[in-house]
Image (tube, rainbow, N blue to C red):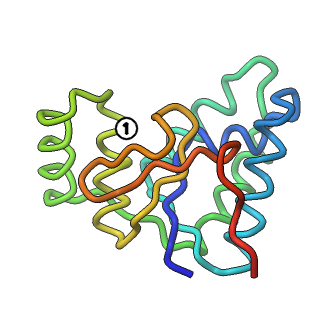
Amino acid sequence: MTPVFVDTSVLLAAENRAAGAAHAAALAWLDGLWRTRSGRTGCQALVEFYERSTSACPPLPQGDARAAIRRYQSWNPWKTDAATLETAWAIEARHQLPWGDCLALACAQHSGCEQLLHTQLPHGAQYAGVQIVHPALQAPPVS
């Protein structure tokens, strides 16, 4: 299976049991990505995950957030470099998306992913050669 880049919003949904169907869909996708060894993410997404999950109401305990990030380290998260920033700025100029989404799209593109698993951008939309997949609107991969 081709790699799928996972946005912060999906990592957060997977930890939010109160999110109901969104939680279940995120877990199903992440499970499929672990089984197929096709999950990818970026350092920026992990930083955002830690900040947002530990300051949520109720907050995720810091130790649990750290454990989750340590698991995702095995995905070799994309490190934002100068080329990634240039791509993100070009996406921002062309599509007028929020900066964090532009950076996620650039990281997905630079890490060789054709899909970005995301809960807030429109399902099926294409930006910079990367298609948005909403976890609740498309079935996860099977091994």
The residue at 36%/35% (across/down) is 100
Tell me the amino acid under the disc marked 1: Asp
The location of residue 72, given as percent across then percent down, is 63, 64
The location of residue 99, given as percent across then percent down, is 29, 32
Indicate the quadrant where residue 67 lies. bottom right
Quadrant containing the N terminus in the rendered view: bottom right
Depth check: give the residue in front, 88 or 57.
88
Depth check: give the residue in front, 19 or 127.
127
The location of residue 3, given as percent across then percent down, is 50, 73
How busy is the neighbourhood of tag 1: few (under 14 within 10 Å), some, or many (20 plus)? Answer: some
Left/right placement of residue 111 relative to residue 36 reads: left
The residue at 22%/59% (across/down) is 81
Left/right placement of residue 4 relative to residue 26 reads: left
Quadrant containing the C terminus in the rendered view: bottom right
Left/right placement of residue 8 relative to residue 64 reads: left
The residue at 21%/33% (across/down) is 95
Q: How many marks?
A: 1
- Tag 1 secondary structure: helix
Left/right placement of residue 69 relative to residue 123 reads: right
Depth check: give the residue in front, 30 or 135.
135
Whether residue 95 is situated above or below residue 58 in the rendered picture: below
Q: Which residue is mark 1?
A: 101
Whether residue 138 is situated above or below residue 74 in the rendered picture: above
The location of residue 124, given as percent across then percent down, is 46, 46
Indicate the quadrant where residue 42 lies. bottom left
